Amino acid sequence: MIYWHIFWSFFIANLLGYGGGPATIPLIQNEVVNHYDWMTVREFGDVLAIANALPGPIATKMGGYIGFQIGGYLGAIIALIATVLPSALAVIILFKFVNLFKDSPKVKLMTKSVQPIIAILLAVMAYQFFLTAFENSGLFHLVLLAVASYFTLSKIKLHPSLVIACALIYGGVFLS
């Protein structure tokens, strides 16, 4: 039964997560943390941080890792299949209709309507991670990392992957 739960949680999150990885993250979090209690918010945040630091699609990395943690190798394979299957099916089924509806006002309105919902889901998730970071690392480290990240990204124009790597190193040295 656990394999069905793994499949369903990642399938439904990626089916409803219109917009790619960032849109599916709150949905995956809801399934993994709130619905099945497979992880805490902190553990999910750690997985998200590592998945962001590695190259490639975030949803597949998270699916593979979480699936492995819950169900071993078979769980990882099932989670990866469930993560990719909605997009693969959509491409196969909808490919013939792309040219017919690409200029439809209804399709454009639907796309515009989904964007605020994704923004709200990402904001709620960011707020939850902020509270968790504040509780676990304290105000000093949280402000220091936030200011340093903002400065290096906006003023120095350092690549985001380097900022993430530096933050991971800082956390490993000072917060572990």
Image (tube, rainbow, N blue to C red):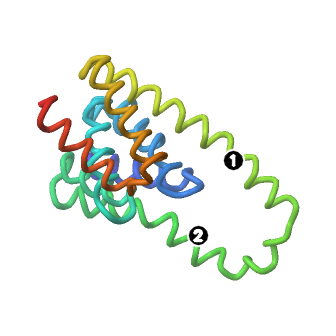
Q: Nearer the viewer, residue 73 or 158?
A: 158
Residue sitting nearer the eye, 68 or 4 = 68
Residue to which mark 2 is pinned: 90
Tag 1: amino acid? Val
SS for tag 2?
helix
Which quarter of the rendered picture does the C terminus lie within?
A: top left
Q: Earlier in the sequence, mark 1 or mark 2?
A: 2
Q: Viewer-nearest of labels 1 and 2?
A: 1
Residues packed near mark 1 inside 10 Å, few (<14), some (14 to 19) or many (20 plus):
some
Q: Amino acid at mark 2?
A: Ala
- Residue 39 vertical position relative to residue 107 in the rendered view, above or below: above
Residue nearest the observer in this picture, 102 or 46: 46
Q: Secondary structure at mark 1?
A: helix
141 vs 105: above or below: above
Position of residue 92 measured from the top left corner of the image (x, y, whole percent): 57, 78
Image location of residue 77, percent across then percent down:
26, 64
In the image: residue 162, left or right of residue 109: left
Residue 65, label in figure: none
Q: Please provide percent x and percent y for residue 117.
A: 65, 40
Is 20 left, or right, of 99 in this rendering?
Answer: left
Check disc 1 and report the residue beneath it. 114
Taking the image as shown, residue 84 lies to the left or right of residue 46, namely right
* Residue at 34% from the left image edge and 52% from the top image edge: 52
Q: Quadrant of residue 84?
A: bottom left
- Give the spatial CA distance, label 1 vs label 2: 17 Å
Q: Position of residue 134 (x, y in %)?
A: 33, 20
Residue 143 in which image quadrant: top left
